[in-house]
Image (tube, rainbow, N blue to C red):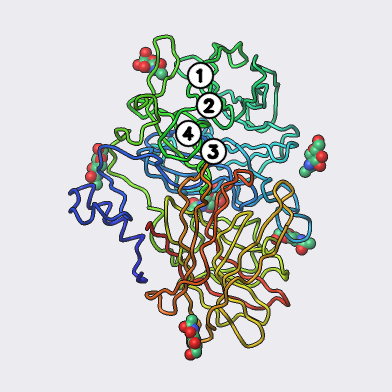
Amino acid sequence: MTMFNMKHAALLVGYLISVAFAAPDLASDPNVIPRAATTFSNPVLWEDHPDLDVFRVGDVFYYSSSTFAYSPGAPVLKSYDLVNWEPVSHSVPELNFGAKYNLNGSGRGYVKGIWASSLRYRASNDMFYWIGCVESNKTYIWTAPGTSAAKNKGEVANWTWSSHPPINTCYYDCGLLIDDDDTMYVAYGNPRIQVAQLSPDGLTQVKSQQVYAPSSGETIEGSRMYKINGTYYILVTKPADSEYVLKSKSPFGPYESRSLVSRISGPLASAGYSHQGGIVSTPDNKWYYVAFMDAYPGGRIPVVAPLTWTADGWPQVVTDNGRWGSTYPVPIQSNRTVTSPLGTDEFKSAQLSHEWEWNHNPDKSKFMLLPGGGLVLQTASVTTDLFDARNTLTHRIIGPKSTGTFRINVAKMQDGDRAGAILFRDRSAYIGVHRDRNTAAIVVVNGLTMAEGTWATAAKGTVATRGPTVDNGSGDIWLRIQADVTPAFGLTQERTATFSYSADGTRFTALGSPFALSNSWRYFTGYRYGVFNFGTKALGGEVVVKSFAMQLV
Ligand SMILES: *[C@@H]1O[C@H](CO)[C@@H](O)[C@H](O)[C@H]1NC(C)=O
Ligand SMILES: *[C@@H]1O[C@H](CO)[C@@H](O)[C@H](O)[C@H]1NC(C)=O
Ligand SMILES: *[C@@H]1O[C@H](CO)[C@@H](O)[C@H](O)[C@H]1NC(C)=O
Ligand SMILES: *[C@@H]1O[C@H](CO)[C@@H](O)[C@H](O)[C@H]1NC(C)=O
Ligand SMILES: *[C@@H]1O[C@H](CO)[C@@H](O)[C@H](O)[C@H]1NC(C)=O
Ligand SMILES: CC(=O)N[C@H]1CO[C@H](CO)[C@@H](O)[C@@H]1O
């Protein structure tokens, strides 16, 4: 690995492919996403982006996903072709759901926070609306005004989000619809589906009523609401294996129901069924279903398939002999592209990119981006429990197999500080640096676990392997995790991750034994790469995260 900026290199290569077609050696590089292909492969973005809501403004597709206690929450992804996606904003810049989301003494929010929520654009007031129920009590609303999206064919120059007073009822798993006449509706509920009509400003409820209940007594949820050619549709999922379409002439029903997919196999082996999702059309009126599939240990990842419509207005998924296709023709041949998730981030912008989310709301006084590049992480908590430490910064893992490499300067760590690169989830392990008195040693720690269900810390982890000391010269150390997040449902053998370190960024030395990745879905969020720094004795120490590189292997 070199410190050459791979992200820009990948972009440049992508552009060359799109205009000139690829030289064979470039086309075979797994880190270059081909831009001018005529087919795409599923999953479209092998990253954990569950509970998706997808829609289009002009030429731009948008995708919102759920993030639980990670902060900022509810990333907004952008695409020109439904295949290549880049996070460009977060609808919830700070989790304003209560003190526990700060992780500083009032409990913690792991697995709570943002579940299935909804994002739509309202052209009449040029505003994006995000809405989501948190902890079964309240529905939170954030809006981004003044985006000029309608005027600029979907492009948004300025995402500035502000919060509004919550609605004091839970729109569980909600889906927004902005009707042709500009009335706003929300479909929600489990297992009975309700539709609420909102006030003209979209910020309070006018009325709400039940519109559908499954006769079978099945659990259904994950509502997504549409109006297409004068007909109302609500898509709902039966977790975690099917999707139904509800259809009516009125937003308040009565709704008829049909299956869209039921236990459809493919496109990946040893994964769950593609199910919960939404539908979206291209400017030339071709329709697509974007669903997610459970693919633990990686999380829930998006897959795309074309739709056709019956003469009486029911959507049908185009399958590959009954299976979800591994490949389909690309929805749109666009000469515009988005930034690849692969490559190196040297933290050179004034703000963190939207690839990053903290484990909870961060202590903003304890990190800063340096003008010349680099992220300073001062210790923000004194604790012996990493799950209690503030300011752990996480990044989704791209699958099926990738490396995440942090270059960290540890010269200013203090006695008792712990910093490093973690595989962050409810069953975690890390390669890091433990500074005790004058010695900073490289260690692999495993066995950090939260108790399933309560998410209280069950074990704080132990040093499994001790490596060399690092206090050499500049104090830069490269810490690498290589993770295999290929889905492994029903397999007795768990996927593993390995750890290595380097003093020069080129020659890496493995440390510790492979760490087995949990396939359980209960924590919902899949494994992430993360970087952390906390004190066990006192505040005052710091590390500088100089770069993070993610590469497929
Ligand atoms: C973005 O929009 C916000 C709110 O409308 C405004 O305060 C801010 O100045 C805008 N920023 C830019 C760069 O236009
Ligand atoms: C909606 O109506 C238009 C015009 O009649 C038609 O071309 C299109 O196929 C219809 N779309 C759907 C999803 O039924
Ligand atoms: C991209 O396509 C658009 C519309 O087809 C065209 O106007 C534009 O010139 C193209 N841009 C490039 C860089 O090829
Ligand atoms: C917890 O963190 C938040 C946000 O950083 C801050 O406003 C609040 O004062 C902190 N509370 C305590 C008890 O430190
Ligand atoms: C630091 O120097 C010591 C002593 O020369 C050496 O044993 C150790 O491997 C070095 N650490 C790294 C990370 O290179
Ligand atoms: C955060 C919060 O207020 N949670 C409450 C939501 O409602 C349930 C029961 O209705 C309470 O138990 C929670 O404390």
Lower sequence index among marks 1 and 3: 3
Q: Is mark 3 within 8 Å of ligand 1?
A: no
Lower sequence index among marks 4 and 2: 2
Q: Residues within 10 Å of mark 3 (few under 14, many from 20)?
A: many
- Mark 1 secondary-structure assignment: strand
As drawn, the label of residue 242 is 2
Residue 5 falls left or right of residue 478: left
Q: Which residue is mark 1?
A: 259
- Mark 4 secondary-structure assignment: strand
Q: Residues within 10 Å of mark 2 (few under 14, many from 20)?
A: some
What's under tag 3, amino acid-wise?
Phe
Q: Are marks 2 and 3 in contact (CB under 8 Å)?
A: no
- Mark 3 secondary-structure assignment: strand
Lower sequence index among marks 2 and 1: 2
Front-lying residue, 315 or 346? 315
Q: Nearer the viewer, mark 1 or mark 3?
A: 1
Residue lying at 48% horizontally and 68% vertically, measured from the top left: 406
